[in-house]
Amino acid sequence: MGQNRGRYFQYIITLILFLYGSQQANAQNTEAPLLTILDQIEELYDVKFSYANEVIENTRSTPPDYTQKLSGILDELSKKTSLTFKFIDERYIAISLSQDAFIDLCAILIDGETQFPLAGATIEVIGTNQTTISNAEGLFLLKNIQADAQIEIRFIGFESRIVNVQEIQETNPCVQINLNPNISILRDVVLESIFAKGINKTNDGTLKLDVSTFGNLPGLTEPDVLQMIQALPGVNSVDETISNINIRGGTTDENLILWDGIRMYQNGHFFGMISGFNPYLTENVSFYKNGTPARYGESVSGLISMHSSEEFPDKIKGGFQLNMINAGAFAKIPVNEKLVIHTSGRRTFTDLFETPAFKQYFDKVFQDTEITNLQNNQQGTLSSEDEFTFYDFSLKAIYAPSKKDRFKLNFLNIDNSLDFTKSFATENSQTSETSELDQNSIAGGLSWNRNWNEKINTEVLLYGTYYLLDASNLDIFSNQKFEQSNEVLETGAQFDFNWQIKDNYRFTTGYQFTETGISNKQEVNIPLVRNFVKEVLLKHALYVSNFLELPKTKTSIRAGLRGNYFQKFNTMLIEPRVNIHQKLGNGFALEVAFEQKSQTVTQRIDFQSDFLGVEKRRWVLANDKDVPIVNSTQFSFNIQYQKRNWLIQAEAYSKKVNDITSANQGFQNQLQFVRTTGNYETQGVEFVVNKKTKNWSSWLSYTFAKSDYTFDSLDPSTFPHNFDIRHQVNLATSYSMNQFKIASGINWYTGRPVSVPVSRDAIEIVNSQPVIRFDDPNTKRNDDYFRADVSVEYEFNISQNTFAKINAAVLNVTNRKNVLNTYFTIDSNNESENLQINQVEQVSLGLTPNVSLQILFN
């Protein structure tokens, strides 16, 4: 009996040992978090591990054999996890990724339907801040990526794709990846690619300009966004500048220009000839002519919102640029995985030597100003010297402490400076006086963007923007000194809340506070006269916006309301905004847009000789008296066809702007010193035809517009607008093959209106002063405008990570003398009994060549 009990006991012990061994074997084959395994090792061997959380947080492994030595355990884990274990001392062990765990990769992104390369797609290494974008050929490169990582590829209008890194290791040639167009969801689908590559339109009415992928446009050597916009129908500059962009008949101050959400009161260098925003750090631009989202205010015409790059490169990227006007450099510097700094700077070098392009720009900008119109009524020799420089500098720091949070710090400085010295010499003496003109802008902002979850996002922006136009004009004969300044200081705070309630419904709301102060000063020393005016206005704005998509009916609707409260006037303005896009099938679509907007900041011209006659416009603030709040209403209807690389579009619109001032319009006739308020109305039709192949893109655009003023207190009360350009035609074509691009085009439009003196007794004496008697305003026109431009680009590799671009362009190939503006003055050199009227014609740029070189590294 005892033997049986012993035998049973032996069987039970054997069974327990068997079950225990099976459990241990299963445990050895079951993966566990590496962190759990490390805790076990620390307890068994009295050691401590040092590591970065992101190195091990997602790593799992089967447990090692704990009966072996510590070195054997670490070797086993190293083979299983591709991690390196290194003893710092007898107790502490550092864990890092093995060098074998990193690889390089390259790929070319292709449209799965058209087989065209996809430029400007975003490629992100999942779980990191490392991103890049595909170039014009669809190519992207990533260095030192974890071999077990995944990348996500995103491109507007295409289905996002997640790819394992090991599938696309760097090869020669690079792997080709096809992306399929997104046909199930309408949101953010690109409806049409207009003209050149990089100009697109989405179904919510937004015109998107992707600077990083922008194609070639006639006459451009660099992707200047404010020049690019002028290629669009309904957009023009009657004086060939980027500081005077006219959108559907509006004056330039009616446009809202934003840089990373900050309002800019200066947008150009060379007093409007060159954009003040470095094109190599401007990533994309949102542009609206109508149907502006409710988030935006302070504009009765167009909106231009520029966004600088937010790329997190894995190593330093940047470049150098040199053209016949300026030189500059830019860089994107990753400090670590969570912090990156973008910086850029440009400066003119023409104070050292002048180029043909600079001379053409200089003659155009300073014609009929104090700089070029030297008047000598004394016995002696009058001469002059001038020195003009400009520069810009930008800095952007992006800090991403987590995957959900992103902080951005922005800074921008734009400066133009002109020193003009007059010298008068006689046989016995010589005197000199220097006049100065400075135009400067400083802007800065701090923002915090947070993704609370997949559906809710918020952003907070605090910003300040400063503008100063300062002139000092010294008369060498009378010693009279005339000083003028126009100063703007604006601070603001914004909060935006975005909620993707459903896949097809997005709700957005927000609050904005703005304090704007504007001062104008004028001072004369002989006789002593000083005038100083300062206005300050506080504004509160609340908006709501809804974006709804109906996939079954292929309808997209964006509708919103904006409320503006002006504390000083105790006034509330409600502004509705609507944009509806309807697909009809077989390539056809309709779009309807409506908006009401207002603005409190406008520009005024007091005298044509203000600020040396160069930059005559000064910013002023609404005061609810002689400067009212300007408001507008606009409606447009668009029908479009896009299929088989054809785009045909026709858009009709009607726009009315109320409470404009005559001082705001820049009259150079009998209304120059009249101060009254009125309105203008513009009706027009914009027509576009565009045909693209893989290498070619050709387009024709035609705009008809009729724009008239109405000032009830004047006679006649209704007459043509100063920017009443009835007919405009743009015809262009571009071709690209491999590294070579060429583009050419022509721009024609009817001459702008002119006010002319009456045919008889055109001069009369009023208060002992001679005055010109004009016919009805704007009854005549300048000759038609015609300009032909061409540009060429060639791109080549210098090394594996460095390439270069050479661009050459010629503006006004035919050297045609286009009259941009005509006005009349009384010849002050004649005696009173022989007074004569001078006809002054301001002309366009002549034949203007330019060459640029960019050296880019990544």
Image: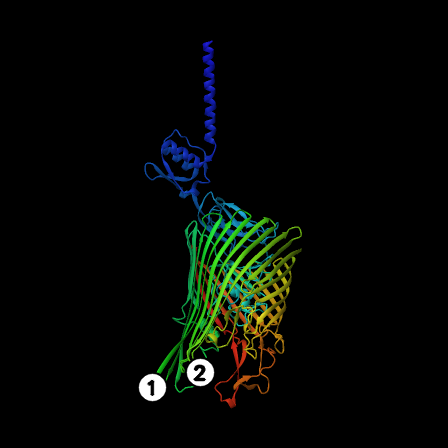
Q: Is residue 742 left or right of residue 331?
A: right
Q: Is residue 524 above or below residue 199?
A: below
Instruction: Answer few, some or many: residues within 10 Å of disc 1's Cα (few below 14, many 20 plus, some between 14 and 19).
Output: few
Q: Is residue 480 above or below residue 796?
A: below
Q: CA distance from mark 1 to mark 2?
A: 21 Å
The three-letter code of the residue at mark 2 reads Gln
Mark number for residue 428?
Answer: 1
Residue 437 visible in the shown view: yes
Residue 548, position as x, y percentages in the image: 62, 53
Residue 132, position as x, y percentages in the image: 48, 52
Q: Which residue is mark 2?
A: 375
| Comes first in the chain, label 1 or label 2 | 2
Instruction: Answer few, some or many: residues within 10 Å of disc 2's Cα (few below 14, many 20 plus, some between 14 and 19).
Output: few
The three-letter code of the residue at mark 1 reads Asn
> For this rendering, which residue is in front, 464 or 852?
464
Q: Quadrant of residue 622?
A: bottom right
Query: Which element is circle 2 on?
Result: loop
Residue 789, position as x, y percentages in the image: 53, 69
Which quadrant: the C terminus? bottom left
Query: Which element is circle 1 on?
Result: loop
Residue 392, position as x, y percentages in the image: 43, 64
Q: Is residue 72 above or below residue 494?
A: above
Mark number for residue 237?
Answer: none
Residue 798 visible in the shown view: no
